[in-house]
Image (cartoon, rainbow, N blue to C red):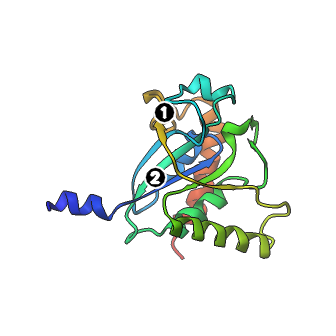
Amino acid sequence: MSTNQMEKSKLETATLGGGCFWCTEAVYKKLNGVKEVVPGYSGGHTKDPSYQEVCTGNTGHAEVIRITFHPDEISFEKILEVFFAMHDPTTLNRQGNDIGTQYRSVIFFHSEEQKRIAGQIIRSLETEKIYSDPVVTEVAPFEVFYSAEDYHHNYFERNKNQSYCRFVIAPKVEKFRKIFLTTP
């Protein structure tokens, strides 16, 4: 086995929906141990949907990101810690002004271990009353991922002056930097 194949065999995948995938992609691309972040669609019944189809809310798909990470550098627990800090897991089918099932809070688990960890973290958030409202994050088995159209990839980096990027994504990236990228 080549070094490249060995490296790939050690990688794991997480598929998360926390509202708009432009926001979540921008945050996770900055995490050490994350090798790749791809925006796309998952959790629905329409095969290979387009962005326009997903936006109707009729496909059943959520806007998600597929995160490829090295578990020796970042744990699935840490990935979920960022996930729960960077979106509101208490609003059903909504993140800010983005409304619809395509913006739902969801963890598509790739293994029983990921399912266990997700459940444990959600129970902990509830027990510790981190949020004033109940966590409504869906935890479901991963089935299929459809990559979003090319213009969605690296959206924030390529469109920093666009108003949505300046007023919605940039504050989330700044919050992420303050919480997760500062040294003690």
Q: Pinpoint residue 158: horizontal percent, then vertical percent.
A: 46, 33
* Side (left or right) of 168 relative to 72: right
The residue located at (60%, 58%) in the rendering is 83
Residue 52, quarter of the rendered image: top right
Residue at the spot of label 2 = 67
Q: CA distance from mark 1 to mark 2?
A: 14 Å
- Residue at horizontal 65 percent and vertical 43 percent from the top: 19
Residue at horizontal 54 percent and vertical 77 percent from the top: 184
Q: Is residue 8 above or below residue 151?
A: below
SS assignment at label 2: strand
- In the image, residue 172 lies at what x, y percent? 63, 50
Q: Which is nearer the eye, 181 or 72?
A: 72
Pointer 1 or 2: first along the chain: 2
Q: Is residue 36 above or below residue 55?
A: below
Question: Which residue is at the front of the view, 40 or 119?
Answer: 119
Instruction: Identify the image quadrant of residue 44.
Output: top right
Q: Tell me the quadrant of the picture where the N terminus can be found.
A: bottom left
> In this figure, which residue is indicated by the disc labeled 1?
148
